[in-house]
Image (cartoon, helix red, strand yellow):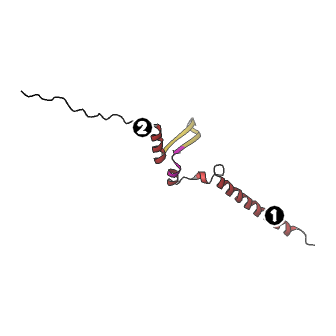
Amino acid sequence: MTDVDIRQRSYPVAGPQTTNLADILERVLDKGIVIAGDIKVELLDIELLTIRIRLFVASVDTAKKAGIDWWETDPALSSRAARSALQDENRELRERLEALESKTRDESPQQ
């Protein structure tokens, strides 16, 4: 009689992959994630208040690809936008001042 090797070869069993927080954050920022919800307060079928919540979490590059770049034009968040807003306000005030001065010149009696 011959000896038969009845040992089975054991292969590693695939278990759940471990993912750390950095990997998850990298994926979310790379692809982006949208969370949306509405809160409505009604009394006797009369809508008193509606709050719409939209949250988009992504990297700056991903957001720009999605067409979102409001932080570049918000004066509270961008020094370039703040300078631009000040320049626009300054130009508008100069135009208003010029209009008032020309109106005052036209109305003043000629001597």
**Residue at the left extreme, as displayed:** 1
**Residue displayed at 71% across by 56% down:** 86
Range of magenta residues:
54-61
Q: Secondary structure at mark 1?
A: helix
Asked if residue 19 lies left or right of residue 79, the reply is left
Residue at the disc numbered 2: 19
**Residue displayed at 73% across by 62% down:** 91
Real-space Cα distance between discs 2 and 1? Answer: 67 Å
Q: Secondary structure at mark 2?
A: loop
Q: How many marks?
A: 2
Which amino acid type is marked by label 2? Thr
Residue at the disc numbered 1: 100
Q: Tell me where residue 77 appears, x and y as whole percent.
A: 63, 49
| Quadrant of residue 82 within the rendered picture | bottom right
Q: Earlier in the sequence, mark 2 or mark 1?
A: 2
Q: Which mark lies nearer to you, 2 or 1?
A: 2
Check the picture and name the quadrant holding the N terminus.
top left
Q: Tell me where residue 47 appears, x and y as whole percent.
A: 58, 39
**Residue displayed at 47% across by 44% down:** 26
- Between 43 and 82, the one nearer to me in the picture: 82
Asked if residue 65 lies left or right of residue 91, the reply is left
Q: Tell me where residue 66 appears, x and y as whole percent.
A: 50, 53
**Residue displayed at 45% across by 44% down:** 27
Which amino acid type is marked by label 1? Leu
Asked if residue 7 lies left or right of residue 99, the reply is left
Residues packed near mark 1 inside 10 Å, few (<14), some (14 to 19) or many (20 plus): few
